[in-house]
Image: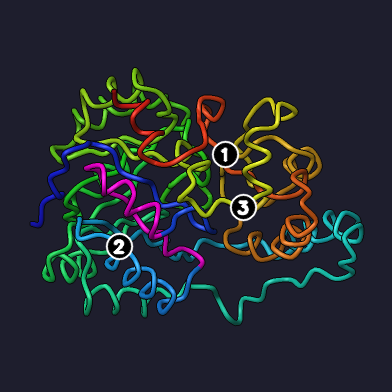
């Protein structure tokens, strides 16, 4: 089985779909001895391939690509319809008079087959998966072309399932992480076991290299995680980096003292995800159905309209629990403070 690349610095830039993860961010972390993942989620296979090529033009160091795994979890159409009605008044405030209901006739697979084909024909050193476990056939096809194949897990049970399929390594994501929890089913309520407890539990259960993720925004937390992991995966830490593609609205919110806490919510996409707590969560957190990517598509126009208006109260503002510790600047400067 392919091994994880050897890193001079045990820090990996997490895949952050929707814009923050850029070739420049990956290359900047690689330049100081770490590595990083491109986020293929919400991109076409062609867009993913373009980012791979752009990253190769910036660095010769090993890097990875992360894919969202499509699911066939059942969706309650009536619940989606009810959620549309709940969103209607707020959507109208942004001039949106009709939020289209997602249809089951054209399920969103996030260009899955084409992405796998690209990664088989033009392999990268690491491929990781979030939201599920592709089967042994997919895993072996990527291992055969030299990719280290990594599963994201949020529990001991998920870790044991990944080991049984034949994954090379695991990203162990604790509940402190910003953005989506990587549970293997949309319907699963993510566990609350802190990373400090989850990581040693997974290490005891499976004999695989572990990458720790979730709430690691200072040197002490990183050092503690490395007692059980070979590297740490940092996302929120890099949201304000010069090299990140984080939107201006998101950047302002992360530095705005008016935001005082983070919340795990299904309101934006139908999957549990940690965001700065805003009015969108206040209005819709209690009624959002467990339906991904249906809710993602349903709320998309509203979130885009709010983003265009620069209104942070009605966009997703992914952030981990340690967001108050992060700072802006070049990646090299940010990491120097974390890893003196």
* 2 vs 3, front mark: 2
Instruction: Give the spatial CA distance, label 2 vs label 3.
Output: 22 Å
Q: Nearer the viewer, residue 292 or 221?
A: 221
Picture coordinates of residue 300, whole percent (x, y): 69, 63
Which label was assigned to residue 58?
2
Quarter occupied by the N terminus:
bottom left
Q: Decide: marks 2, 3 in contact (CB < 8 A)?
A: no
Find numbered disc 1 in the image and state the secondary structure of the residue it sits on: strand
Q: Is residue 127 left or right of 216 when viewed as pictured?
A: left
Magenta stretch encompasses residue 31: yes
Residue carrying label 3:
247
Q: Is residue 236 left or right of 288 when viewed as pictured?
A: left
Picture coordinates of residue 230, whole percent (x, y): 19, 35
Give the residues drawn in magenta, as a range.
Answer: 23-42
Quarter occupied by the C terminus:
top left
How busy is the neighbourhood of tag 1: few (under 14 within 10 Å), some, or many (20 plus)? many
Find numbered disc 3 in the image and state the secondary structure of the residue it sits on: loop
Instruction: Give the spatial CA distance, label 1 vs label 3.
Output: 17 Å
């Amino acid at each position: 089985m392919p091994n994880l690349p050897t890193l001079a610095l045990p820090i990996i830039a997490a895949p952050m779909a929707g814009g923050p993860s850029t070739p420049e961010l990956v290359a900047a972390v690689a330049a100081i001895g770490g590595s990083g993942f491109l986020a293929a989620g919400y991109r076409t296979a062609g867009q993913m391939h373009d980012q791979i090529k752009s990253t190769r033009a910036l660095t010769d160091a090993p890097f990875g690509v992360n894919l969202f795994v499509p699911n066939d979890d059942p969706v309650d159409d009536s619940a989606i319809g009810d959620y549309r009605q709940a969103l209607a008044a707020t959507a109208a405030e942004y001039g949106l008079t009709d939020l289209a209901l997602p249809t089951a006739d054209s399920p969103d697979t996030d260009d899955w087959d084409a992405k796998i084909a690209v990664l088989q024909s033009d392999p990268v050193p690491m491929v990781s998966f979030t939201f599920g476990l592709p089967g042994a056939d997919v895993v072996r096809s990527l291992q055969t072309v030299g990719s280290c194949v990594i599963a994201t897990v949020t529990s001991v049970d998920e870790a044991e399932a990944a080991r049984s399929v034949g994954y090379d390594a695991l990203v162990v994501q604790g509940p402190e992480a910003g953005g989506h929890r990587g549970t293997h089913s949309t319907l699963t309520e993510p566990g609350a076991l802190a990373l400090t407890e989850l990581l040693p539990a997974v290490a005891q259960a499976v004999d695989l290299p572990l990458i720790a993720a979730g709430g690691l925004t200072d040197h002490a937390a990183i050092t503690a995680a490395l007692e059980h992991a070979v590297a740490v995966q940092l996302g929120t830490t890099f949201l304000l980096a010069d090299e990140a593609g984080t939107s201006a609205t998101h950047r302002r919110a992360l530095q705005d003292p008016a935001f005082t806490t983070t919340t795990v919510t299904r309101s934006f996409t139908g999957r549990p995800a940690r965001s700065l707590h805003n009015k969108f969560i206040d209005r819709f957190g209690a009624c959002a159905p467990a339906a991904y990517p249906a809710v993602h598509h349903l709320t998309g126009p509203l979130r885009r309209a709010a983003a265009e208006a620069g209104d942070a109260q009605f966009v997703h503002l992914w952030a981990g629990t340690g967001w108050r510790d992060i700072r802006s600047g070049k990646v090299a400067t940010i990491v120097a403070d974390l890893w003196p």
